[in-house]
Image (cartoon, coloured by chain):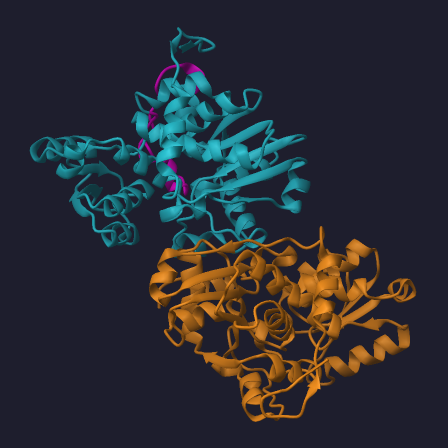
Chain colours: A orange, B cyan
Amino acid sequence: VSAISPDGPASPAFPFAKIELAAERLKGHAHVTPVHTSRELDRLSQSQTFLKCENFQRTGAFKFRGAFNAVSSLTAAERARGVLTYSSGNHAQALALVGQLFSIPITVVMPNDAPAIKRAATAAYGARIISYDPDRITREQLGGEIAAREQLTLIPPYDHAEIVAGQGTAVREFLQQAPGLDLLLVPCGGGGLLSGSAIAAKALAPQCRVVGIEPELADDATRSFRTGVLHTVHHPPTIADGTRTPSLGTITFPLVRQYVDDMQTVSEDAIKAAVRFLFLRMKLVVEPSGALGIAVLLSGQIRGPGRIGVVISGGNLDPATAAQILPEP
Amino acid sequence: VSAISPDGPASPAFPFAKIELAAERLKGHAHVTPVHTSRELDRLSQSQTFLKCENFQRTGAFKFRGAFNAVSSLTAAERARGVLTYSSGNHAQALALVGQLFSIPITVVMPNDAPAIKRAATAAYGARIISYDPDRITREQLGGEIAAREQLTLIPPYDHAEIVAGQGTAVREFLQQAPGLDLLLVPCGGGGLLSGSAIAAKALAPQCRVVGIEPELADDATRSFRTGVLHTVHHPPTIADGTRTPSLGTITFPLVRQYVDDMQTVSEDAIKAAVRFLFLRMKLVVEPSGALGIAVLLSGQIRGPGRIGVVISGGNLDPATAAQILPEP
């Protein structure tokens, strides 16, 4: 099986069966998250818009899907030795919970300047946390060293086929709940959710355009997508902390190029306005990265007509960020 | 048809058929709001807890149900002349939207110190707003004068049989979504939601205990319930602004006495902790009045075992209140 990328050589297709298998594994463990709608949003976007609310997923973000699927795919021996990851965000919490559910030891490598609230949430699920100084060593280096020394299996936040497959289950589910979508808007950080979503959409709704959304301040994936060359951006000062990844991965970059139709960027103000709209009008707690698709719609960069699906990727909006965003500018 | 109140004379029962009729009228107009659950809440409350999310109702609160039902019950001539209410809160917004849907003129009498955000939201639905100085005249006096002069029909926020019937549809719906509840926790302001909920529960799930929840600082209904004498409280300084009503009404007081099993009060700190839990753990935007039932559970005043239903009455949490509540104390 292969697919032709529009301006590159044929690359092997990602088998949709991996997403189907992931969905089987997740049954009864991940929440079937609800789809919300809003007359006001429909009016503003001149479309029928459907929000896939992964902020209601376990640990507050889609990351639970990939983490659960990746751990499910390990052998009993690998599980017994334990799993390591590097993340200061939602993947760390998700993997820590999955470790608790499978009763396997989880190690998380986290920068020493990670927010205390995220460190505490990860520790609360029983994970071992190893801090490092990001000015002295990269998380990949340190994580690799510890994993090798302790024979732990590395499950990175996005650049992993089983992570991609797990994240793809959200859109597989979404297309059953909201069939006939013309357009799907998906946040893009490292590209795990975006590529999984696009693979699922192309298999189940081939007529549906898939557009990845990034903050303007962290537009590495958009530039990589357009040029075919991997761009990186370091410590981008965007409020959307889930998209502060340096670049797409070696697995996700070709998948995004192959399966995604387009990329769009949004301003910081548009992201904040989207979080505010979701809070005040739709009563949904959504973190900035999770609001990227709504930012594109409310800013008028994309409009209807048609049926537009938006993946709301997470709801881990911390109180300080909420207090900064919610008052009118 | 009559029912015996435990320590008073028999009073005529409120016909459940009025709630059934209201549900018919609301079909396709009110949202069927979702029920959310939380493993963490179940663990903390030692129960299976179900949240009826009326924060996702139109205009962000259950009030849409009563307002729509009350306007539906008017004659064409009454509708053409228009409707008046007094409210600075969710009932005003709900009635204003209902007026828009029915294309009938709505007048809202609002104190001149009402929050600008609530005034703007009501005006945005096209209602005429009349301000008054609460130190010089009561809203009942002014509203009565204007209604008489302009031949408007008064639809008060809670003390009205069709309002009670409309609010009762939320629990009628809830008991279909979460059958077999042992206990139902319902916020209490003027008693419209509480009495409607209790009437529906006693008709559909007679074994289910119904408990009304008030802030300690606004415990007039609790004292009225216990003593059989109507107590009032003026401008109580509770953060739960939906419960700042002075007292139960002439219709709702006997209904609460007759149908409700018990009343409980909660502290301001417990209310804030509940709003915070709903935000941080369940990703739900809930206003303080809407969080009263969760406050009772998290503070340990009521525990399981059993199946506990909680009515989350509204989500109109304004940014300033959110910024005050969300940071850890």
Q: Is residue A45 visible?
A: yes
Is A214 above or below relative to A55?
below
Viewer-side residue, B124 vs B7? B124
The secondary structure that dominates the magenta segment is: loop
- Asked whether, in this view, residue A308 is left or right of residue B91, the answer is right
Most distant residue in the left direction: B149
Q: Is residue A93 visible?
A: no
Residue found at x 34% / y 65% = A44
Residue A84 is covered by the magenta coloring: no
Residue B242 is covered by the magenta coloring: yes
- Asked whether, in this view, residue B222 is left or right of residue B180, the answer is left
Viewer-side residue, A124 vs A258? A258
Is A37 above or below relative to A228?
above
Viewer-side residue, B325 vs B31? B31
Indicate the quadrant where residue B104 lies.
top left
Indicate the quadrant where residue A194 lies.
bottom right
Residue found at x 57% / y 75% = A188
- Asked whether, in this view, residue A161 is left or right of residue B223, the answer is right
Residue A264: horizontal and vertical position, in percent? 48, 80
Most distant residue in the right direction: A77
How many marks the image carries: the answer is: 0
Residue found at x 38% / y 43% = B28
Magenta range: B225-248
Is A327 above or below relative to B25?
below
Which quadrant would the N terminus of chain B be assigned to in this image?
Answer: top left
Residue B14: horizontal and vertical position, in percent? 38, 18
Viewer-side residue, B118 vs A311? A311
- Asked whether, in this view, residue A270 is left or right of residue B41, the answer is left
Residue A260: horizontal and vertical position, in percent? 57, 79
